[in-house]
Image: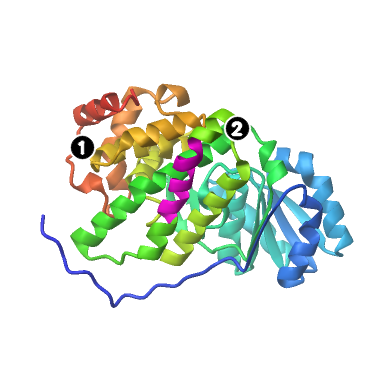
Amino acid sequence: MSIKKKSQSASHTMELPRQIVVGEKNIHDVGDFLKSLSRPTKVSIISGKNVKKIIGKKIDDSLKKSKIRRVWHLAVSNHITALKETEKKVRSDKSDLIVGLGGGRSVDVAKLCSFNLKIPFVSIPTSASHDGIASPFVSIRDKKPHSLVATAPLGVFVDVDIIKRAPRKLIASGCGDLMAKISAVKDWELGRDRTGEYYGRYSADLASMSAKILIENSSSFSKNGLDVRVIVEALISAGVASCIAGSSRPCSGAEHLFSHAVDHLEYGIGLHGEKCGIGSIMIAKLQGQDWKKIVRTLKNVGAPTSAKEIGLSPKILTKALTIAQSLRPERYTILKEVKMTESKALKLAKSTGVL
């Protein structure tokens, strides 16, 4: 395959969070944090029902102390129809700031509302299941699941103690999303070499480092338990890598397309990070990388490495691998160089222990 000359003329925009706070048992400082960012008088909080039940009073007390009025909204779904309904409600609030409080869905809904309404938003994650904590990208469901560029958070506020109390599988899912950077960066390099697309060395290295720190510490995590703060900071770094790149390229490659394809075929199987982690095992092998290192790391942190662990059938898995590239044909990945058939997909999954 011919290698095209790299283009240096294209420009891109870097949108970064202004302030990131990572602490422990610091949720009572939320009001002060918001005041320091933009001095809002009223905020719209987008959250899940359980999250509001668990920490809603603490948030209310902190905001009341800072003289910030608030309106709560439930993030029901990331389907485009539900998103538009939430956006309509938030618009009527006439708030100065939007807060995404909770897991990936709540942060994504807040992010898209922020982008469409041109109101800044703050990310306050209560779990660390993927790298959307600090990135400008949103996963939505429409006719087919996909990601789109929205806006980076004005600020990120993390109480590690709250994330520690979330179900363990959520942090393990975040580890799966971190390992996806290995195959994503390789796909970006392929795109650079094959099509001449922009490749940002710094953002690529930052994303790779987020995965590397997990690999280097996973053995210790296996013996002594997960260091949640390290994982959270790695996920934030991965999100910032996307901000610097001006695209999701350093964090999202064929393994993410595989995850989206599974959602397209049968929504609700596994968590996003779990599917990305499993996808990265297979994609890394296609790329000629050390896929066994990914398997070892995921096992050490308690993340799934097989389809069976997340209830993914061989039929859906093989079909997902064959259609993954078609979900985003403009993005160059290793799947453009492999004419993936269901028999090839089955062989790949079996050879890596995914099936």
Residue shown at 28%/46% (left/top)? 325
Give the image's coloring scheme.
Answer: rainbow
Q: Is residue 8 above or below residue 238?
A: below
Tell me the element at label 2.
loop
Question: Relative to residue 257, is residue 64 drawn left or right?
Answer: right
Give the position of the N terminus as an image quadrant. Answer: bottom left
Main secondary structure type of the part rendered in magenta? helix
Q: Mark 1 points at which residue?
A: 340
Q: Position of residue 315 (x, y in %)?
A: 32, 24
Total numbered labels: 2
Residue shown at 45%/66% (left/top)? 244
- The reply to whether residue 269 is in sight is no
Q: Mark 2 points at which residue?
A: 225
Amino acid type at mark 1:
Met
Report which quarter residue 52 is drawn in.
top right
The alpha-carbon separation of the residues under discs 2 and 1 comes to: 39 Å
Binning the other alpha carbons within 10 Å of mark 2 as few (below 14), some (14 to 19) or many (20 upward) gives few
Q: Which of 212 and 163 is in front in this view?
A: 212
Q: Where is residue 302 in the image (x, y as percent from the top left)?
A: 51, 29
Residue shown at 55%/34% (left/top)? 221
Residue shown at 72%/71% (left/top)? 38
Q: Where is residue 343 in the image (x, y as percent from the top left)?
A: 20, 27
Report which quarter residue 20 is drawn in.
bottom right
Boundaries of the magenta span:
207-218
Q: Earlier in the sequence, mark 2 or mark 1?
A: 2
